[in-house]
Image (spheres, rainbow, N blue to C red):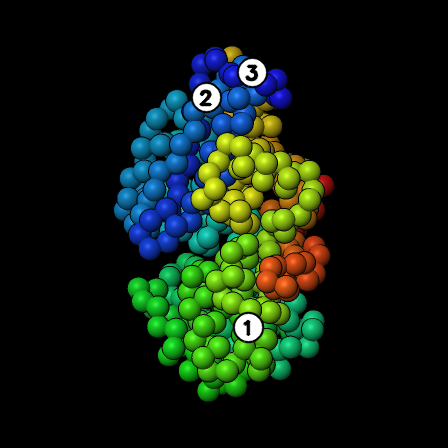
Amino acid sequence: MGTGERATGSPIKIRALATASGGIDFSSAPRSATAYFKCVNANGGINGRPVDYAYEDDALNQQKAAQIAAKLAADRSIVALAGDATFIGCAGANPIYKRADLYSITGTGVAQACFESSNIAPINAGPRISGVATLQYLQAQGKTSRFAQARHNIPGVGDWVADGVENYAKDKKVRIVETVVRDATSVDANSGILELKKADPSAVLIEDVGPVAVALLKAAAAQGLQEKVVWSCLTSCYDAGFPKQVGPQWEGFIANSELQLVDAKTPDNLQWRTILQKYGSPRDPRDTFGQSGFLAAKFLTDTLLKLDPKDITRETVAKAVVGIKGFKSDILCTPWYFGSADRHNANHTTRMAVIKGGKYVELEGCKPVEDPGLAPVIAREQRDGLAG
Protein backbone atom coordinates (compact mmCIF):
# COMPACT_ATOMS: atom_id res chain seq x y z
CA MET A 1 0.00 0.00 0.00
CA GLY A 2 3.05 2.28 0.31
CA THR A 3 1.91 3.92 3.55
CA GLY A 4 5.20 3.54 5.40
CA GLU A 5 3.17 2.33 8.39
CA ARG A 6 3.37 -1.17 9.82
CA ALA A 7 0.25 -3.31 9.42
CA THR A 8 -1.27 -4.27 12.77
CA GLY A 9 -4.50 -6.06 11.89
CA SER A 10 -5.35 -9.76 11.87
CA PRO A 11 -2.62 -11.69 9.99
CA ILE A 12 -3.26 -13.38 6.64
CA LYS A 13 -1.48 -16.72 6.55
CA ILE A 14 0.40 -17.67 3.35
CA ARG A 15 2.85 -20.55 3.06
CA ALA A 16 5.17 -22.27 0.58
CA LEU A 17 6.80 -25.66 -0.01
CA ALA A 18 10.43 -25.60 -1.13
CA THR A 19 13.51 -27.76 -1.52
CA ALA A 20 16.18 -26.06 0.57
CA SER A 21 18.40 -29.03 1.49
CA GLY A 22 19.07 -32.68 0.66
CA GLY A 23 21.75 -31.87 -1.90
CA ILE A 24 19.86 -29.06 -3.68
CA ASP A 25 19.08 -25.61 -2.34
CA PHE A 26 16.23 -24.29 -4.48
CA SER A 27 14.99 -21.72 -1.99
CA SER A 28 15.69 -18.55 -4.00
CA ALA A 29 11.98 -18.05 -4.75
CA PRO A 30 10.58 -18.25 -1.19
CA ARG A 31 13.49 -16.19 0.11
CA SER A 32 12.61 -13.34 -2.25
CA ALA A 33 8.93 -13.81 -1.39
CA THR A 34 9.83 -13.54 2.32
CA ALA A 35 11.52 -10.18 1.71
CA TYR A 36 8.58 -8.94 -0.37
CA PHE A 37 6.01 -9.78 2.29
CA LYS A 38 8.17 -8.08 4.94
CA CYS A 39 8.03 -4.96 2.78
CA VAL A 40 4.26 -5.36 2.42
CA ASN A 41 3.87 -5.55 6.19
CA ALA A 42 6.02 -2.45 6.70
CA ASN A 43 3.84 -0.51 4.25
CA GLY A 44 0.24 -1.03 5.30
CA GLY A 45 -0.08 -4.76 4.67
CA ILE A 46 -3.17 -5.99 2.83
CA ASN A 47 -5.52 -3.10 3.61
CA GLY A 48 -4.14 -3.00 7.14
CA ARG A 49 -3.69 -6.75 7.62
CA PRO A 50 -0.13 -8.13 7.79
CA VAL A 51 0.96 -11.25 5.91
CA ASP A 52 2.13 -14.20 8.01
CA TYR A 53 4.50 -15.93 5.55
CA ALA A 54 6.85 -18.90 5.91
CA TYR A 55 8.13 -21.80 3.80
CA GLU A 56 8.92 -25.38 4.72
CA ASP A 57 11.79 -27.50 3.43
CA ASP A 58 11.00 -30.91 1.89
CA ALA A 59 14.73 -31.83 1.98
CA LEU A 60 14.43 -33.39 -1.49
CA ASN A 61 12.30 -36.15 0.02
CA GLN A 62 8.98 -36.98 -1.67
CA GLN A 63 7.43 -38.46 1.46
CA LYS A 64 8.31 -35.38 3.51
CA ALA A 65 7.01 -33.12 0.72
CA ALA A 66 3.66 -34.93 0.78
CA GLN A 67 3.50 -34.67 4.56
CA ILE A 68 4.14 -30.94 4.46
CA ALA A 69 1.57 -30.48 1.70
CA ALA A 70 -1.02 -32.37 3.77
CA LYS A 71 -0.27 -30.23 6.81
CA LEU A 72 -0.61 -27.00 4.84
CA ALA A 73 -3.86 -28.15 3.24
CA ALA A 74 -5.34 -29.17 6.60
CA ASP A 75 -4.71 -25.76 8.13
CA ARG A 76 -7.74 -23.82 6.88
CA SER A 77 -6.26 -20.55 8.15
CA ILE A 78 -3.77 -20.76 5.27
CA VAL A 79 -5.51 -18.96 2.40
CA ALA A 80 -2.98 -19.60 -0.38
CA LEU A 81 0.57 -20.62 -1.26
CA ALA A 82 3.11 -18.36 -2.98
CA GLY A 83 6.77 -18.63 -3.95
CA ASP A 84 6.92 -22.43 -3.78
CA ALA A 85 10.02 -24.07 -5.25
CA THR A 86 9.99 -27.82 -4.71
CA PHE A 87 12.21 -30.00 -6.87
CA ILE A 88 10.19 -33.17 -6.28
CA GLY A 89 6.98 -32.29 -4.46
CA CYS A 90 4.43 -31.15 -7.07
CA ALA A 91 3.14 -34.60 -8.09
CA GLY A 92 2.26 -35.58 -4.54
CA ALA A 93 1.09 -32.13 -3.44
CA ASN A 94 -1.39 -31.24 -6.19
CA PRO A 95 -4.03 -33.91 -5.39
CA ILE A 96 -3.87 -32.80 -1.75
CA TYR A 97 -4.28 -29.14 -2.68
CA LYS A 98 -7.11 -29.93 -5.09
CA ARG A 99 -9.16 -31.70 -2.41
CA ALA A 100 -8.58 -28.80 -0.03
CA ASP A 101 -9.25 -26.00 -2.58
CA LEU A 102 -5.77 -24.60 -1.90
CA TYR A 103 -3.92 -22.84 -4.75
CA SER A 104 -0.24 -22.10 -5.29
CA ILE A 105 1.27 -19.26 -7.29
CA THR A 106 4.51 -21.16 -7.52
CA GLY A 107 7.77 -19.29 -7.86
CA THR A 108 9.89 -22.01 -9.43
CA GLY A 109 8.41 -25.08 -11.08
CA VAL A 110 10.91 -27.82 -11.86
CA ALA A 111 9.27 -31.19 -12.48
CA GLN A 112 6.71 -31.93 -15.19
CA ALA A 113 4.03 -32.28 -12.51
CA CYS A 114 4.49 -28.62 -11.49
CA PHE A 115 3.27 -27.58 -14.95
CA GLU A 116 0.61 -30.24 -15.34
CA SER A 117 -1.39 -29.64 -12.16
CA SER A 118 -4.73 -28.02 -11.49
CA ASN A 119 -3.81 -26.07 -8.35
CA ILE A 120 -0.18 -25.18 -9.09
CA ALA A 121 0.86 -22.50 -11.60
CA PRO A 122 4.57 -21.55 -11.82
CA ILE A 123 5.81 -18.07 -12.66
CA ASN A 124 8.89 -19.45 -14.43
CA ALA A 125 8.91 -21.15 -17.82
CA GLY A 126 10.41 -24.40 -16.51
CA PRO A 127 13.42 -26.47 -17.56
CA ARG A 128 11.71 -28.08 -20.56
CA ILE A 129 10.85 -24.71 -22.13
CA SER A 130 14.32 -23.45 -21.18
CA GLY A 131 15.95 -26.40 -22.95
CA VAL A 132 13.88 -26.03 -26.12
CA ALA A 133 14.52 -22.28 -26.15
CA THR A 134 18.28 -22.83 -26.00
CA LEU A 135 18.27 -25.41 -28.80
CA GLN A 136 16.00 -23.09 -30.80
CA TYR A 137 18.59 -20.31 -30.48
CA LEU A 138 21.53 -22.57 -31.35
CA GLN A 139 19.69 -23.97 -34.37
CA ALA A 140 18.88 -20.47 -35.64
CA GLN A 141 22.56 -19.61 -35.37
CA GLY A 142 23.60 -22.64 -37.40
CA LYS A 143 25.44 -24.28 -34.49
CA THR A 144 23.64 -27.62 -34.39
CA SER A 145 25.20 -29.73 -37.15
CA ARG A 146 26.23 -32.16 -34.39
CA PHE A 147 24.18 -31.43 -31.28
CA ALA A 148 24.63 -33.16 -27.90
CA GLN A 149 22.94 -32.89 -24.53
CA ALA A 150 23.94 -33.74 -20.96
CA ARG A 151 21.21 -34.36 -18.39
CA HIS A 152 20.41 -36.07 -15.08
CA ASN A 153 18.10 -39.05 -14.61
CA ILE A 154 15.59 -37.66 -12.10
CA PRO A 155 12.18 -39.00 -13.28
CA GLY A 156 9.73 -36.34 -14.39
CA VAL A 157 12.51 -33.77 -14.78
CA GLY A 158 15.53 -35.00 -16.75
CA ASP A 159 13.54 -37.22 -19.09
CA TRP A 160 10.82 -34.57 -19.53
CA VAL A 161 13.34 -31.86 -20.49
CA ALA A 162 15.11 -34.20 -22.91
CA ASP A 163 11.78 -35.18 -24.45
CA GLY A 164 11.07 -31.54 -25.27
CA VAL A 165 14.54 -31.02 -26.74
CA GLU A 166 14.33 -34.23 -28.78
CA ASN A 167 10.84 -33.43 -30.10
CA TYR A 168 12.02 -30.02 -31.23
CA ALA A 169 15.13 -31.56 -32.79
CA LYS A 170 13.01 -34.07 -34.68
CA ASP A 171 10.63 -31.37 -35.88
CA LYS A 172 13.51 -29.15 -37.08
CA LYS A 173 15.71 -32.02 -38.32
CA VAL A 174 18.50 -31.31 -35.82
CA ARG A 175 20.88 -34.26 -35.47
CA ILE A 176 21.51 -35.34 -31.86
CA VAL A 177 24.85 -37.19 -31.79
CA GLU A 178 25.00 -37.90 -28.04
CA THR A 179 22.89 -37.78 -24.88
CA VAL A 180 24.89 -38.20 -21.69
CA VAL A 181 22.73 -39.17 -18.72
CA ARG A 182 24.11 -38.51 -15.23
CA ASP A 183 23.08 -40.52 -12.19
CA ALA A 184 21.50 -37.88 -9.94
CA THR A 185 23.10 -39.48 -6.86
CA SER A 186 26.63 -38.66 -8.01
CA VAL A 187 28.60 -36.11 -9.99
CA ASP A 188 31.05 -37.80 -12.34
CA ALA A 189 31.94 -34.90 -14.60
CA ASN A 190 35.00 -36.48 -16.20
CA SER A 191 33.26 -39.55 -17.64
CA GLY A 192 30.43 -37.42 -19.02
CA ILE A 193 32.85 -35.04 -20.72
CA LEU A 194 34.81 -37.95 -22.20
CA GLU A 195 31.57 -39.30 -23.70
CA LEU A 196 30.82 -35.90 -25.19
CA LYS A 197 34.35 -35.52 -26.51
CA LYS A 198 34.11 -38.88 -28.28
CA ALA A 199 30.89 -37.75 -30.02
CA ASP A 200 32.68 -34.67 -31.41
CA PRO A 201 29.66 -32.30 -31.10
CA SER A 202 29.38 -28.81 -32.55
CA ALA A 203 27.23 -27.68 -29.61
CA VAL A 204 26.33 -29.04 -26.16
CA LEU A 205 23.31 -28.21 -24.01
CA ILE A 206 23.71 -28.88 -20.28
CA GLU A 207 20.31 -29.78 -18.83
CA ASP A 208 21.30 -29.86 -15.17
CA VAL A 209 21.63 -27.71 -12.06
CA GLY A 210 24.23 -24.95 -11.86
CA PRO A 211 26.79 -26.68 -9.60
CA VAL A 212 26.86 -29.75 -11.88
CA ALA A 213 27.28 -27.49 -14.91
CA VAL A 214 30.28 -25.85 -13.21
CA ALA A 215 31.87 -29.28 -12.68
CA LEU A 216 31.20 -30.29 -16.28
CA LEU A 217 32.70 -27.10 -17.67
CA LYS A 218 35.83 -27.43 -15.56
CA ALA A 219 36.25 -30.99 -16.83
CA ALA A 220 35.65 -29.79 -20.40
CA ALA A 221 38.29 -27.08 -20.02
CA ALA A 222 40.77 -29.72 -18.82
CA GLN A 223 40.09 -31.55 -22.11
CA GLY A 224 40.57 -28.37 -24.13
CA LEU A 225 36.95 -28.37 -25.32
CA GLN A 226 35.90 -24.84 -24.40
CA GLU A 227 36.88 -23.36 -27.78
CA LYS A 228 35.97 -26.33 -29.98
CA VAL A 229 32.32 -26.58 -28.91
CA VAL A 230 29.50 -24.08 -28.36
CA TRP A 231 28.46 -24.67 -24.74
CA SER A 232 25.05 -23.73 -23.37
CA CYS A 233 22.78 -24.37 -20.43
CA LEU A 234 19.28 -24.03 -19.01
CA THR A 235 18.27 -21.10 -16.81
CA SER A 236 19.70 -23.05 -13.86
CA CYS A 237 23.11 -21.69 -14.99
CA TYR A 238 21.87 -18.12 -15.29
CA ASP A 239 23.15 -16.83 -11.97
CA ALA A 240 25.14 -13.65 -11.39
CA GLY A 241 27.85 -15.68 -9.65
CA PHE A 242 28.16 -18.33 -12.37
CA PRO A 243 30.73 -16.53 -14.62
CA LYS A 244 33.12 -16.17 -11.69
CA GLN A 245 32.65 -19.82 -10.71
CA VAL A 246 33.59 -21.14 -14.16
CA GLY A 247 36.40 -18.66 -14.83
CA PRO A 248 37.47 -16.33 -17.65
CA GLN A 249 38.03 -19.16 -20.14
CA TRP A 250 34.26 -19.48 -20.46
CA GLU A 251 33.62 -16.15 -22.13
CA GLY A 252 30.90 -16.81 -24.73
CA PHE A 253 29.07 -19.44 -22.65
CA ILE A 254 25.32 -19.26 -23.38
CA ALA A 255 22.40 -19.67 -20.97
CA ASN A 256 18.67 -19.27 -21.28
CA SER A 257 16.97 -16.69 -19.06
CA GLU A 258 13.31 -17.40 -18.33
CA LEU A 259 12.83 -13.87 -16.99
CA GLN A 260 14.39 -10.40 -17.27
CA LEU A 261 18.17 -10.19 -16.81
CA VAL A 262 18.83 -9.89 -13.08
CA ASP A 263 20.73 -6.59 -13.36
CA ALA A 264 18.21 -4.88 -15.66
CA LYS A 265 17.26 -1.37 -14.58
CA THR A 266 13.52 -1.76 -15.16
CA PRO A 267 10.94 -0.73 -12.51
CA ASP A 268 9.86 -4.15 -11.17
CA ASN A 269 13.37 -5.58 -11.39
CA LEU A 270 14.78 -2.62 -9.47
CA GLN A 271 12.00 -3.00 -6.90
CA TRP A 272 12.93 -6.67 -6.42
CA ARG A 273 16.60 -5.85 -5.88
CA THR A 274 15.80 -2.89 -3.61
CA ILE A 275 13.45 -4.97 -1.45
CA LEU A 276 16.05 -7.75 -1.14
CA GLN A 277 18.62 -5.15 -0.13
CA LYS A 278 16.38 -3.68 2.61
CA TYR A 279 14.31 -6.65 3.81
CA GLY A 280 16.35 -9.67 2.71
CA SER A 281 19.85 -10.95 3.31
CA PRO A 282 23.10 -10.56 1.35
CA ARG A 283 22.99 -14.37 1.07
CA ASP A 284 19.64 -14.33 -0.76
CA PRO A 285 20.43 -15.21 -4.39
CA ARG A 286 19.94 -12.50 -6.99
CA ASP A 287 18.93 -14.98 -9.66
CA THR A 288 16.05 -15.80 -11.99
CA PHE A 289 14.33 -17.96 -9.40
CA GLY A 290 14.52 -15.12 -6.87
CA GLN A 291 12.77 -12.92 -9.42
CA SER A 292 10.01 -15.52 -9.83
CA GLY A 293 9.47 -15.69 -6.07
CA PHE A 294 9.18 -11.91 -5.97
CA LEU A 295 6.59 -11.99 -8.74
CA ALA A 296 4.61 -14.77 -7.06
CA ALA A 297 4.39 -12.70 -3.88
CA LYS A 298 3.61 -9.51 -5.82
CA PHE A 299 0.85 -11.09 -7.92
CA LEU A 300 -0.79 -12.63 -4.86
CA THR A 301 -0.53 -9.34 -2.94
CA ASP A 302 -2.11 -7.40 -5.82
CA THR A 303 -4.90 -9.99 -5.93
CA LEU A 304 -5.56 -9.85 -2.18
CA LEU A 305 -5.67 -6.04 -2.20
CA LYS A 306 -8.75 -6.24 -4.44
CA LEU A 307 -10.68 -8.34 -1.90
CA ASP A 308 -12.73 -7.23 1.08
CA PRO A 309 -10.12 -7.33 3.90
CA LYS A 310 -12.81 -8.72 6.23
CA ASP A 311 -13.52 -11.60 3.88
CA ILE A 312 -10.14 -13.07 2.98
CA THR A 313 -10.62 -16.80 3.32
CA ARG A 314 -9.36 -19.82 1.44
CA GLU A 315 -12.58 -19.86 -0.55
CA THR A 316 -12.51 -16.20 -1.60
CA VAL A 317 -8.78 -16.30 -2.35
CA ALA A 318 -9.10 -19.53 -4.39
CA LYS A 319 -11.71 -17.89 -6.63
CA ALA A 320 -9.58 -14.76 -7.03
CA VAL A 321 -6.37 -16.67 -7.83
CA VAL A 322 -8.02 -18.83 -10.48
CA GLY A 323 -9.34 -15.64 -12.06
CA ILE A 324 -5.91 -14.02 -12.43
CA LYS A 325 -5.12 -13.07 -16.01
CA GLY A 326 -3.24 -10.36 -17.84
CA PHE A 327 -0.82 -9.62 -14.98
CA LYS A 328 2.07 -7.64 -16.46
CA SER A 329 5.62 -7.06 -15.26
CA ASP A 330 8.82 -5.89 -16.94
CA ILE A 331 10.42 -9.03 -15.48
CA LEU A 332 8.19 -11.16 -17.74
CA CYS A 333 8.13 -11.13 -21.53
CA THR A 334 4.35 -11.61 -21.68
CA PRO A 335 1.37 -11.21 -19.28
CA TRP A 336 0.84 -13.98 -16.73
CA TYR A 337 -2.36 -15.81 -15.82
CA PHE A 338 -3.55 -18.67 -13.60
CA GLY A 339 -6.76 -20.07 -15.09
CA SER A 340 -8.75 -23.20 -14.31
CA ALA A 341 -7.05 -25.79 -16.53
CA ASP A 342 -5.13 -28.88 -15.42
CA ARG A 343 -2.00 -27.56 -17.10
CA HIS A 344 -0.20 -24.27 -16.42
CA ASN A 345 2.64 -22.82 -18.48
CA ALA A 346 1.78 -19.16 -18.88
CA ASN A 347 5.45 -18.24 -19.27
CA HIS A 348 6.74 -19.61 -22.58
CA THR A 349 8.60 -16.60 -24.00
CA THR A 350 12.21 -16.28 -22.84
CA ARG A 351 15.54 -14.52 -23.38
CA MET A 352 19.09 -15.72 -24.03
CA ALA A 353 22.19 -14.50 -22.19
CA VAL A 354 25.93 -14.87 -22.79
CA ILE A 355 28.99 -14.45 -20.56
CA LYS A 356 30.86 -11.36 -21.71
CA GLY A 357 33.42 -9.39 -19.72
CA GLY A 358 32.99 -11.70 -16.73
CA LYS A 359 29.22 -11.32 -16.44
CA TYR A 360 26.02 -12.29 -18.23
CA VAL A 361 24.65 -9.85 -20.81
CA GLU A 362 21.60 -10.17 -23.04
CA LEU A 363 22.27 -12.17 -26.20
CA GLU A 364 18.71 -12.28 -27.54
CA GLY A 365 15.56 -10.55 -26.34
CA CYS A 366 12.11 -12.02 -25.74
CA LYS A 367 11.31 -14.84 -28.14
CA PRO A 368 8.37 -17.31 -28.07
CA VAL A 369 9.56 -20.87 -27.53
CA GLU A 370 8.52 -23.33 -30.23
CA ASP A 371 7.99 -26.43 -28.08
CA PRO A 372 5.54 -28.62 -30.05
CA GLY A 373 4.07 -29.72 -26.72
CA LEU A 374 2.79 -26.18 -26.03
CA ALA A 375 0.08 -26.37 -28.71
CA PRO A 376 -2.80 -27.07 -26.25
CA VAL A 377 -1.63 -24.29 -23.92
CA ILE A 378 -1.42 -21.71 -26.70
CA ALA A 379 -4.79 -22.78 -28.12
CA ARG A 380 -6.44 -22.32 -24.70
CA GLU A 381 -4.80 -18.90 -24.24
CA GLN A 382 -6.20 -17.72 -27.54
CA ARG A 383 -9.64 -19.25 -26.96
CA ASP A 384 -10.09 -17.87 -23.45
CA GLY A 385 -8.20 -14.60 -23.85
CA LEU A 386 -5.88 -15.49 -20.97
CA ALA A 387 -2.60 -13.89 -21.96
CA GLY A 388 -3.83 -10.55 -23.26
Alpha-carbon distance for marks 1 and 2?
50 Å
Alpha-carbon distance for marks 2 and 3?
17 Å
* Nearer to the camera, 323 or 218: 218
User: Quadrant location of the C terminus?
Assistant: top right
Point out the tag, 1 or 3, that comes first from the N-terminus: 3
Three-letter residue code for mark 1: Gln
Residue, disc 1 = 249
Three-letter residue code for mark 2: Ile
Residue, disc 3 = 5
| Nearer to us: label 2 or label 3 | 3
* Residue 244 sits above or below residue 37 on the image: below
Three-letter residue code for mark 3: Glu
Which disc number belongs to residue 321?
Answer: none
Question: 363 left or right of 284?
Answer: right
| Nearer to us: label 1 or label 3 | 1
Q: Position of residue 386 (x, y in %)?
A: 66, 41
Point out the tag, 2 or 3, that comes first from the N-terminus: 3
Residue, disc 2 = 12
Mark 1 element type:
helix
